[in-house]
Amino acid sequence: MSSYSDTMPEIETARLLLRPYTPQDLDELAPISSNPAVMRYSPRGAIPKDWVKEVTQEILQFFITHWQQHGFGVWAVMEVRFVD
């Protein structure tokens, strides 16, 4: 049986890499999730500072599970120049 990372697609352009989220994205996504301007239109609304890591981890797990169950979902978008 293939692992999650083996079966999920990635799309790379000259400038961007689009890929499904992974648990390793927690530290980079948490500051975004804690920004009230970013979360303004999210159904969750602003995340209290004391709960950022926990709620962001729940969001990541939702994204990952959705990809596993449906074969599509939310993409992580990264600039290629920052990808190792």
Image (cartoon, rainbow, N blue to C red):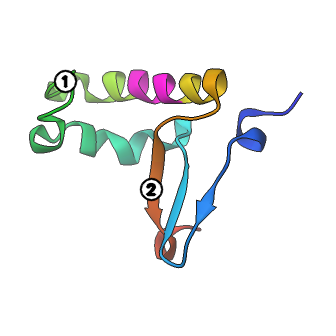
Q: Amino acid at mark 2?
A: Val
Q: Residues within 10 Å of mark 2 (few under 14, many from 20)?
A: some
Q: Nearer the viewer, mark 1 or mark 2?
A: 2
> In which quadrant of the rendered image does the N terminus lie?
top right
Q: Amino acid at mark 1?
A: Asp
Vertical side of 30 occupied by 82: above or below: below
For this view, does 13 lie left or right of residue 35?
right
Q: Residue at x 78, y 43 (%)?
A: 6
Vertical side of 75 occupied by 15: above or below: below
Q: What stretch of residues is rendered in magenta? A: 57-63
Between 50 and 70, the residue placed more toward the observer is 70
Where does residue 31 sit, x and y in percent of width and height? 26, 44
Q: Which residue reaches farthest right?
A: 1
Where does residue 62 sit, x and y in percent of width and height? 47, 22
Where does residue 34 sit, x and y in percent of width and height? 20, 37
Q: Residue at x 17, y 35 (%)?
A: 39
Mark 1 and mark 2 residues within 8 Å of each other at the beta carbon: no
Q: Quadrant of residue 22?
A: top right
Q: Residues within 10 Å of mark 1 (few under 14, many from 20)?
A: few
Question: Which numbered marker is on residue 31?
Answer: none
Residue indicated by mark 1: 50
Query: Which type of secondary structure does the marked residue at label 2 adopt?
Result: strand
Q: Quadrant of residue 8?
A: top right
Question: Which numbered marker is on residue 77?
Answer: 2
Between 55 and 3, the residue placed more toward the observer is 3
Vertical side of 45 occupied by 24: above or below: below
Q: CA distance from mark 1 to mark 2?
A: 26 Å
Between 8 and 48, the residue placed more toward the observer is 8
Residue 28 colored in magenta in the image:
no
> In which quadrant of the rendered image does the C terminus lie?
bottom right
Mark sitting earlier along the chain (1/2): 1
